[in-house]
Amino acid sequence: MKILMINKFLYPNGGSETYMFELGKQLERMGHEVQYFGMEHEGRCVGNRVDAYTGSMDFHGGSKLTKLTYPLKTIYSSEARQKLRLVLDDFRPDVIHLNNFNYQLTPSILLEADKWRKESGHACRILYTAHDYQLVCPNHMCCRMDGQVCEDCLGGKLTSCIRNKCIHGSAAKSAIGFAEAAFWRWKKVYKRLDAIVCCSEFMKKKLDSDPILREKTVAMHNFISTKKAPAVEKQNYVLYFGRFAKEKGIETFLKACKALPDIPFVAAGSGPLEGELAGIPNLKNVGFQSGKALEKLIVEARFSVYPSEWYENCPFSVMESLMYGTPVLGADIGGIPELIDAGVNGELFESGNADALTEKIRALWDDHARLYAYTRACGTTRFDTVEEYAEKLMPLYQG
């Protein structure tokens, strides 16, 4: 089977790229042929046989003249259509697997993909893995700039994006986001998708608010490549690891730290609110960590806290913590409750409620027997491997 993976970034940049690269490697191990299409970039590490890619779009750099053309290019890209057609004519894929494409590649590539399969007469499935809420929310997070969860655009009331300045707090950028979403909803472009893979039941429910998407969605939790960590002696600290940002619940977490001065906390990460971590005696900020250093922090923690305040989909941090044998105290929001077996390998608390989080941390820290039981239960927690995940994709690929 020939599979064309499409993503705007073809270099390591975030979760969607990690997903695509790992899945692509597994598909090749299974004997399938995989090529990639997206933007050109100096860090690009995958590609296609005809070396056809769109020009890089840097929203934070470039000349003033270049930036002036971006508003139209984020809605429709004739370049993306032309370059994609070169790849399709050469590769003739059996499956086109889309990941993140909005703004840089634009949904116009869906028009070209559908046009090509009709003109060529080649049976080709078009799938999309939803890594966020882009298909139903112009700012893709269902979250306003002030951190408030928002569902105003679900069901089609897209003008809320402009009124609330949902994209970077800018009326102009929000107007462009509105125009992009409204134009493609009017064109019913997502009807061309054969299946939409949602990484949580929660996300599926939100996408199902659109009748065009409802019959196409399938819920499949992401795979995880993390292996079980060896049993180690737990150290005396509670861990937060992730981005230091409002939507991640870092402010709520810091309130709990201050309310529990006798409990040691460790924070690993970076982000816009990093300055707020300073001056808390019982909180040690170790900065951004990865690899073996992060693994050691997770494995040795008594438990980890995941206090997010936006509609998380299938957070890798929760899965990783559990796989490493560390119970999770997570916010009861989005797809987080689907990953934690509350009362077995962790617990949930009301998202955004600092008092509830403080109370849960105190109770769990003081109850050694319960925490030990949760830690042991983590040993039986499992999520799909990339091998299992790829096998589950096959029926969707084959139609």
Image (cartoon, rainbow, N blue to C red):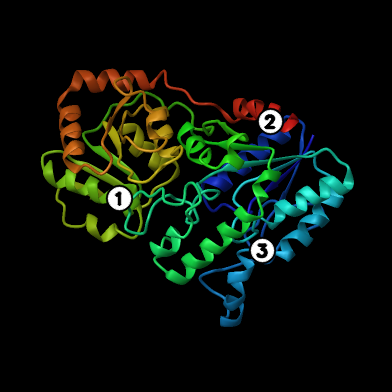
Residues 285 and 311: in front is 311
**What's under tag 3, amino acid-wise?**
Tyr
Residue 244 visible in image = no
- Compared to 181, does 335 lie above or below? above
Quadrant for the C terminus, please: top right
Q: Which of the two marks, 3 or 2, is nearer to us in this view?
A: 3
Badge 2 or badge 1: first in the primary sequence: 1
- Residue that carries the numbered disc 1 in the rendered image: 286
Q: In the figure, is residue 140 to the left or right of 144?
A: right
Q: In the figure, residue 80 lies in which quadrant?
A: bottom right
- Left or right relative to 171: residue 74: right
Which of the 4 quarters of the picture holds residue 210? top right
Q: Residue 61, how many percent across, how many down?
A: 53, 73
Identity of the residue drawn at 49% across and 67% down: 175
Residue wearing tag 2: 396
Give the alpha-carbon distance from disc 1 to disc 3, as whole Å.
43 Å
In x, y percent, where is residue 304? 30, 35
The residue singled out by tag 3 in the image is 76
Q: Quick check: marks 1 and 3 in contact, CB under 8 Å?
A: no
Labels 3 and 2: the sequence-earlier one: 3
